[in-house]
Amino acid sequence: MIQLYDLETKYPNVRFSPFCWRVKYALAHKGLRWEEVPIGFTDKDKLPSPNEGKVPVIVDDQEVVSDSWDIALFLDTKYPNDPLFDGAESRAQAYFIKSWSEMVLQILISRMGILDFYEVLKDSDKGYFRDTRESRSGVTLEEWGGNPESARTEFLKALEPLRVTLKHQSFLGGAQANFSDYIMVGLLQWMRCGSSLTVFDENDAVFEYQEKLLDLHDGLGRLSLPYSSAIADE
Ligand SMILES: N[C@@H](CCC(=O)N[C@@H](CS)C(=O)NCC(=O)O)C(=O)O
């Protein structure tokens, strides 16, 4: 069975890595089964080689593939049924969604949720997370994440192109979800599972879209508890 190295948190049923969620949805889309290998930020020596010091990494029949985008390409080549991309054009357009999500949306999400993302980590990972993120941004986690409401306002505004698109079609992939939608659900899961902030009003088209994505593949996205339920169970 395929092994998927995913990011562990202090809760066994909370997973929030956006890149690992992309891969879980991609595997489920193809009807492939996998076994999760949870590791912390400070356990990366446990990753199979070659790797880039990041999750996700998959091992499929001795083949090791890292990076969520490369994993999607690998899966479409090895398991061509139920493609994640409907040809070269769809792949090229999904690359734009990946870039938009990583260069615009991810930054706003991290400003909304970073203090919760820090809290949900295992204690042994917290020092590493703080040091690496603070040296990357040049400010403390508290400064970076100090105004979640303003980041939320910017995030909701930045999603307007998605909202308009969803008036015309159910998914970015059209009538069916494709890898572009799995990039989006990864982002949404990062917030839903890693942070206590309520991002969407229930009448927001993006909220409805998130619900549809959570229902896909037998409710795959709901297998990880939302942050608020995880902390309530403590
Ligand atoms: N481009 C990579 C990014 C993967 C990534 O950044 N993963 C994070 C977890 S969400 C990670 O493992 N970071 C390790 C670190 O910061 O040391 C992908 O698409 O898979």
Image (cartoon, rainbow, N blue to C red):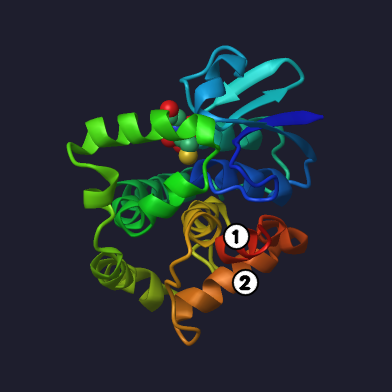
> What label sits on residue 143 in the rendered view?
none
In terms of depth relative to the viewer, which is nearer, 90 or 147?
147
Element carrying mark 2: helix
Residue 153: percent from the left, percent from the top?
27, 72
Image quarter where the C terminus lies is: bottom right
Q: Residue at x 46, y 55 (%)?
A: 187
In terms of depth relative to the viewer, which is nearer, 31 or 20?
20
> Height in image: 25 above or below 174?
above
Name the residue at the front extreme.
234
Residue 86: percent from the left, percent from the top?
56, 50
Q: Give the Cα separation between the discs numbered 2 and 1.
A: 25 Å
Of circles 2 and 1, the one toward us is 1
Quarter holding ligand 1 = top left
Residue 202: percent from the left, percent from the top?
50, 84
Sequence-wise, the earlier of marks 2 and 1 is 2
Q: Is residue 170 visible?
A: no
> What label sits on residue 231 in the rendered view?
1
Q: Which residue position is annotated with label 2?
A: 212
> Height in image: 193 above or below 204?
above
Residue 81: percent from the left, percent from the top?
73, 44
Q: Look at label 2 and name its amino acid.
A: Lys
Name the residue at the bottom extreme.
203
Q: Residue at x 60, y 37 (%)?
A: 8
Q: In the image, is 149 to the left or to the right of 33?
A: left
Element carrying mark 1: helix
Classify mark 2: residues with Cα within 10 Å, few (<14), some (14-19) or many (20+).
some
Q: Look at label 1 and name its amino acid.
A: Ile
Q: Residue at x 56, y 32 (%)?
A: 56
